[in-house]
Every structure is written in structure tokens, then in C-alpha cells.
Image (cartoon, helix red, strand yellow):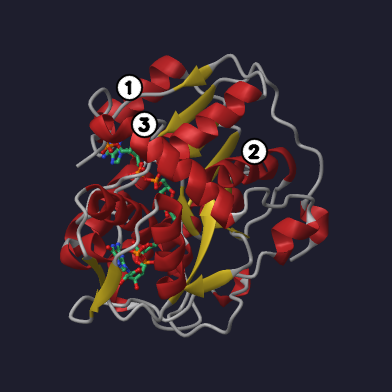
Amino acid sequence: MDSALFADRAVSSDARVYVAGHRGLVGSAVWRAFQSRGFTNLIGRSHAELELTDRAAVFDFFATERPDVVVLAAAKVGGIMANSTFPVDFISQNLQVQVNVLDAALQHGVERLLFLGSTCIYPKFAEQPIREDALLTGLLEPTNDAYAIAKIAGILQVQAVRRQYGLPWISAMPTNLYGPSDNFSPTTSHVLPALIRRYEEARLSNTKSVVNWGTGTPMREFLHVDDMAAACLHLLDTYDGPQQVNVGSGKDLPIKDIATMVAEAVGYVGATEWDTSKPDGTPRKLIDVSTLLGSGWEPTIDLREGLRSTVEWFRANENALRT
Ligand SMILES: NC(=O)C1=CN([C@@H]2O[C@H](COP(=O)(O)OP(=O)(O)OC[C@H]3O[C@@H](n4cnc5c(N)ncnc54)[C@H](OP(=O)(O)O)[C@@H]3O)[C@@H](O)[C@H]2O)C=CC1
Ligand SMILES: C[C@H]1O[C@H](OP(=O)(O)OP(=O)(O)OC[C@H]2O[C@@H](n3cnc4c(=O)[nH]c(N)nc43)[C@H](O)[C@@H]2O)[C@@H](O)[C@@H](O)C1=O
């Protein structure tokens, strides 16, 4: 990617910044990051306050609040089972949310917008590590193809706005994320929060063995959500290009190793079994993060440390979890 696309475009700390999905894993971390940078005009609405699939409500909201900057971190999100069981919800709700927010932002001439996708947009068998230009070069992983198509449509809509209207909107593609305010539901969550909850509950109940999903052989890359939030602000401050930018740690490991790390982090000493009737998903999706690393951003939270603090957060917030 052309490094000239990176330059100082710092967003002013008095800009009106709308963080869509500000109570979710990513949105809440982005909100904290803006706050710690001294931003005073942050705008957020819970799902109950503003239904983003309601086009008229979204346009009314933009007309009233007139944000200068938008971070689109609201989406229907879930792990492998949620994605493969409810593909209609994942494609339909995400397309509606995106189209409504991007159309309203365009109508109101929003100056800077960051759209968040996911690394599942890349082909299932893409060459590893996956570069940004692998987009649309092969078939998708079937367990999340509906979600991925919605995210690809979002990237294309951002590129189209840049082409047709010249606005400096951008997209970022994070790897698998984890951290405080994640979804810890045993059925709909991603692997890390699912394992934290499963091993912690097994420890508390002295259960002799836990059962995880799949074979444990797929490789996954993880990034702490505070590093992700720092990358979002860094991109808004520095990046102006049509191509989506990968955001990851640059390291992956087998799910079996992740399970061992989580068991250690919670202090679980029992056995682990694998339910191979559950899907494995894509075998590997390590992303190439050289574009972002070359622009001066780097991850700061090592996986073991991130796991430790997330377990602490889980223990302190167990009563306020999403189910
Ligand atoms: N978590 C991960 O590992 C990864 C996430 N991402 C991307 O990051 C973004 C944020 O994900 P994440 O923070 O994990 O997801 P979360 O589920 O934690 O947060 C999403 C937020 O969006 C809100 N929301 C969802 N649908 C609507 C709607 N129709 N109207 C209004 N609000 C809505 C949710 O509210 P409520 O919960 O009340 O419905 C929630 O607060 C997504 O675009 C996702 O694709 C990308 C890669 C990995
Ligand atoms: C971020 C990303 O997230 C999803 O893709 P995924 O990476 O396949 O997601 P996952 O975290 O759910 O699983 C990773 C691996 O872990 C295994 N696994 C074991 N035990 C549990 C378990 O208990 N829960 C879950 N969820 N997985 C488990 C599981 O079988 C798989 O092999 C998509 O939503 C996709 O759209 C997307 O963007």
C-alpha cells in the first residue's frame, strides 16, 4: 500500500464524534480512547435509544446531532455458531445498519468516517499472512459468509463515497478481538469470552472436565480491544486511502493453546475435551499488518496480560453480562 496515504490529519478534540455501538466491545473501547485524548463532544446512543435499522430514526438523529466524525462500531456480531445458525440476521441487519448510517452521514457531509469490518471478509484459503489486496480473490468461509458479504458491501460503499463525493472516509479490518465489555454468552460469543466463562464456571463448581467446540486445531490471531481502539484513532488521525487496513497482532496460535492459556489464567486444573460435531470454521486467518505497523502503530498488550485483565473484568462484572 502507498505509504503517502498516511499523513497528519489529526481530528480536533472539540469535534462532534458519534461512536455507533458505544456500549459494545469495540465501541466502548473507542469511547474510552477518545475520552482519554480529551474529546469533549462524544455522542452515543444505546440500541434501545436508537434502532439503527430504522432508517427514518437514523436520519432524524443525524439531523439533530450533526456529528463531524463517525466511528461505525454498531453491528450484529457473534461467534461461529451465531453466524452459522442465523445468517439471515447477520446479512440483513448489518446491511441495513451500514446503509442507514453511511447514507445519513453522507447526506450530512460527515467529514471523517471509520467503517469497521472483520478479517472474515478474506477468502477462506487466502495466502497467509493475508494482505489487504486479497479481498475478493476467492471463496469465503461458509460459517460466516453472510456476515462477510455485508462487511464487504460496507467497504465498497465507503470506497464509492470516496470516488463519487471525495470524502476521506476509511475502513479497518480487525482480527478476532477480546477485552472488557465483550459478549460472554455461552452460545453466541466468540471463542475467548466463551472459554473464560466456561473455565471459570468449571473452576467454581469443581467440574472435572470441560468440552470446547471443534477440533482445537484452527489457528486464530487475537488483539486486545484497547489496542484496536488506539488503532482506530491512529487511522482517523493519519490515514486517507480507499483500501481497508488490517488491524491485528501479527501472531496466531491454535485454539487448543488458547484453551490452555485461558485455563491457566482462571486457575482451572481439570481436563479439556473437544466436541468435533461443532464447526472449526476457517483453518487459519493470520493477517498481514505491515501497512499499519509501517505507519507507526503497534500493539502494546500481550495476550497473556490481556487475558489476565479480561478474566479480572469478567469476575468483577459477572452480574452485568449480556446473556
Ligand atoms: N468482536 C470481535 O472479535 C470483532 C469485531 N469486529 C467488528 O467490530 C464492530 C463492533 O463489534 P463488537 O464491539 O465486537 O460487537 P458488540 O456486539 O460488542 O457491540 C455491537 C454494538 O452495536 C449495537 N447494535 C447492534 N445492532 C444494533 C442496531 N440494530 N441498532 C443499534 N445498535 C445496534 C449493540 O447493541 P446491543 O448489544 O444492545 O444490540 C452493541 O452495543 C463490528 O463491526 C464487528 O464486525 C471485527 C472483528 C472482530
Ligand atoms: C471475529 C470472527 O469471529 C467468527 O469467526 P471465528 O474466528 O471462527 O469465531 P469464534 O471465535 O466463534 O471461533 C473460533 C474457533 O474457536 C472454536 N471454539 C472452541 N470452543 C468454542 C466456544 O465455546 N465458542 C466459540 N465461539 N468458539 C469456540 C471454534 O470452533 C473455532 O474453531 C465469526 O463470527 C467471524 O465472522 C468473525 O469475524
Q: Secondary structure at mark 2?
A: helix
Q: Secondary structure at mark 3?
A: helix
Is the residue marked by circle 2 packed among few (<14), some (14-19), or many (20+) residues within 10 Å? some
Left-right relation of 305 to 12: left
Residue at image mark 2: 233
On the image, the x and y values in percent for residue 73 come to 43, 41
Left-right relation of 218 to 85: right
Q: Of residues 266 and 158, which is closer to you in this image?
A: 266
Residue in the image at 31% along x and 26% along y:
46
Residue at image mark 1: 60
Left-right relation of 266 to 16: left
Is the residue marked by circle 1 packed among few (<14), some (14-19), or many (20+) residues within 10 Å? few
> Residue 316, which numbered label?
3
Q: CA distance from mark 1 to mark 3?
A: 38 Å
Q: Earlier in the sequence, mark 2 or mark 3?
A: 2
* Ligand 2 falls in quadrant: bottom left
Task: Report the mark closest to the observer, 2 or 3.
Answer: 3
Residue in the image at 61% along x and 77% along y:
129
Q: CA distance from mark 2 to mark 3?
A: 28 Å
